[in-house]
Image: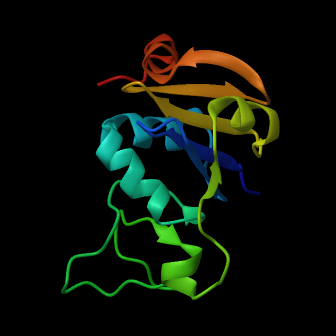
């Protein structure tokens, strides 16, 4: 059974982009991966630029010599529905303002938002705080 999540990024111009992730959305997996590998605006924006994901991993793309597709993915590489399976209409959903995002965004079991240099997390719609604080409380920080 999958644990679905969303990942959103608040851009410097105030717009928000959001993608869906199908597998392992719980804090110990997706949350920790985001915190450890996508902790800058540039990295978070590159991640959501992939569009909806089957799985979130530490790397955005395979090395040139690696085989990577939906069925045979390279180690620790995100699996994207558009890039790796050829599905259409899998790009990030964009909201004009944070207020619009808050009112109309997709919500899953876990929702992660990168804003002002920090990851924030919600579980079943309940705001838990910064991902750093939640992971620290869980004893999951290195």
Q: Is residue 7 above or below residue 71?
A: above
- On-image quarter of the N terminus: bottom right
Residue 67, percent across and down? Answer: 32, 87
In which quadrant of the rendered view does residue 101 lie? top right
57 left or right of 15 in image = left
Q: Is residue 135 above or below residue 3?
A: above
**Residue 57 seen from this side:** no
Q: Residue at x 72, y 56 (%)?
A: 2
18 left or right of 10 in image = right
Tell me the colour scheme of the image: rainbow
135 left or right of 53 in image = left
In which quadrant of the rendered view does residue 113 lie? top right
Residue 10, percent across and down? Answer: 50, 37
Q: Is residue 85 above or below residue 140?
A: below
Q: Residue at x 58, y 36 (%)?
A: 112
Q: Nearer the viewer, residue 130 or 99?
A: 99
Q: Nearer the viewer, residue 94 or 30?
A: 94
Q: Residue at x 65, y 37 (%)?
A: 111
**Residue 72 seen from this side:** yes
Q: Residue at x 72, y 28 (%)?
A: 123
Question: How many numbered marks does the figure carry?
Answer: 0
- On-image quarter of the C terminus: top left
Residue 110, percent across and down? Answer: 68, 37
Residue 50, percent across and down? Answer: 47, 66
Q: Is residue 86 above or below residue 54?
A: below
């Amino acid at each position: 059974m999958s644990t679905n999540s969303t990942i959103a990024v608040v851009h410097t111009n105030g717009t928000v982009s959001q993608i869906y992730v199908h597998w392992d959305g719980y804090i110990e997996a997706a949350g920790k991966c985001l915190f450890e590998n996508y902790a800058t605006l540039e990295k978070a924006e590159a991640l959501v630029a992939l569009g909806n994901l089957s799985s979130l991993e530490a790397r955005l793309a395979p090395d040139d010599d690696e085989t990577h597709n939906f069925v045979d993915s390279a180690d620790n590489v995100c699996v994207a529905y558009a890039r790796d399976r050829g599905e259409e209409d899998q790009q990030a959903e964009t909201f004009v303002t944070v207020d619009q995002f808050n009112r109309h965004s997709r919500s899953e079991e876990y929702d992660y938002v990168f804003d002002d240099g920090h990851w924030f997390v919600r579980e079943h719609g309940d705001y838990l705080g910064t991902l750093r604080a939640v992971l620290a409380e869980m004893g999951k920080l290195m």
